[in-house]
Image: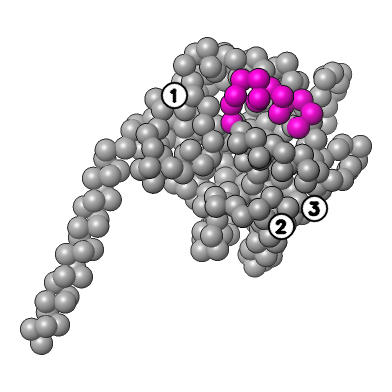
């Protein structure tokens, strides 16, 4: 009986110590905003009208202006891997971080944006819809695996999953989302090699609490699905927020939105 009491006391001590350490670690974390910006497709000429109210297209010139403005104003552009390393305590978070992401996997990301990333030596993440890789859909060209591999091998671009089918997964059985995401990463790893960090961006931001729990339990490190700005002090890997950047929004306006 005495031995059981000792074991119970030791277990309780470990649990209490872990809780104290976790609270201490949280209290010591920097109170720093971590904005994650979201871009989509890029065009060289902005059309007169757009069915999506110019929310999902942009120009290479505007993107370059954004990047230059961020750098000129003291922002450090980090990757999702950098954020994961900061979150686990491996590295220090810069005082003004910013993360650049692109959804869907448009060929324009490689044609127009990859050269800009190389020019300024900045990192970005592309969330691809694997069923569209190497295809042209409704007159819009998507990335091929060769372009994905070339960008990944540069060390500047991370490739993550934006699903296989790009549908509203909050309307379907959760196992369908699970299978979809797992299959999308199987394809990514088949063509791009083992992925140590797995991030999933929900199409349309459509999720449920059950989908979040399921993906967490199936090895997804970060889940992205809401609008807003993250704070490192209470960062939740399963609830990463982004700011959508509409057509030709200036870097100054983006910074104002971040700071306000």
Q: Main secondary structure of the magenta part?
A: helix
In this view, the residue farthest toward the left is 2
Work out how far the residue at label 3 is from the one at label 1, CA to CA, in angstroms.
Answer: 36 Å
Q: Is residue 156 visible?
A: yes
The quadrant of the rendering that contains the N terminus is: bottom left
Q: Does residue 172 lie above or below 53 as drawn?
A: below
Spot occupied by residue 193 in the image (x, y as percentages of width and height): 66, 53
Disc 2: which residue: 190
Look at the image and say whether residue 95 sits in the magenta stretch.
no
Q: Does residue 260 lie above or below 16 as drawn?
A: above
Circle nearer the N terminus (3, 1):
1
Spot occupied by residue 98 in the image (x, y as percentages of width and height): 51, 28
Q: Is residue 55 visible?
A: no
Q: Which mark is residue 131?
A: 3
Q: Residues within 10 Å of mark 1 (few under 14, many from 20)?
A: some
Instruction: Check disc 3 and report its element: helix, strand or loop.
Output: helix
User: Going by the image, does 255 lie left or right of 177?
Assistant: left
Instruction: Check disc 1 and report its element: helix, strand or loop.
Output: loop
Q: Residues within 10 Å of mark 3 (few under 14, many from 20)?
A: few
Disc 1: which residue: 96
Q: Please name whichever residue, 4 or 213, is drawn nearer the observer in this view of the structure.
A: 4
In this view, the residue farthest toward the bottom is 1
Look at the image and say whether residue 112 sits in the magenta stretch.
yes
Q: Residues within 10 Å of mark 2 (few under 14, many from 20)?
A: few
């Amino acid at each position: 009986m005495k031995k059981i009491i000792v074991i119970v006391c030791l277990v309780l001590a470990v649990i209490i110590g872990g809780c104290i350490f976790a609270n201490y670690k949280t209290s010591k974390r920097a109170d720093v905003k971590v904005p994650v910006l979201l871009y989509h497709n890029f065009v060289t000429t902005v059309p007169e009208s757009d069915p999506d109210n110019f929310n999902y297209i942009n120009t290479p010139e505007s993107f370059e202006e954004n990047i230059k403005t961020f750098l000129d104003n003291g922002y450090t552009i980090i990757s999702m891997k950098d954020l994961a390393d900061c979150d686990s305590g491996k590295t220090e978070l810069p005082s003004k971080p910013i993360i650049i992401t692109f959804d869907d996997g448009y060929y324009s990301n490689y044609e127009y944006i990859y050269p800009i990333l190389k020019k300024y030596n900045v990192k970005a993440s592309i969330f691809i819809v694997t069923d569209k890789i190497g295809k042209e859909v409704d007159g819009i060209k998507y990335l091929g695996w060769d372009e994905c591999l070339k960008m990944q091998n540069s060390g500047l671009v991370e490739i993550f999953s934006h699903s296989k089918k790009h549908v509203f997964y909050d309307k379907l059985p959760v196992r369908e989302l699970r299978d979809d995401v797992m299959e999308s990463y199987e394809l990514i790893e088949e063509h791009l090699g083992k992925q140590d960090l797995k991030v999933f961006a929900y199409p349309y931001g459509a999720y449920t609490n059950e989908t979040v729990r399921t993906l967490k339990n199936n090895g997804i490190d970060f889940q992205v699905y809401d609008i807003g700005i993250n704070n490192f002090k209470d960062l939740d890997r399963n609830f990463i927020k982004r700011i959508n950047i509409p057509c030709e929004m200036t870097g100054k306006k983006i910074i104002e939105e971040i700071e306000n």
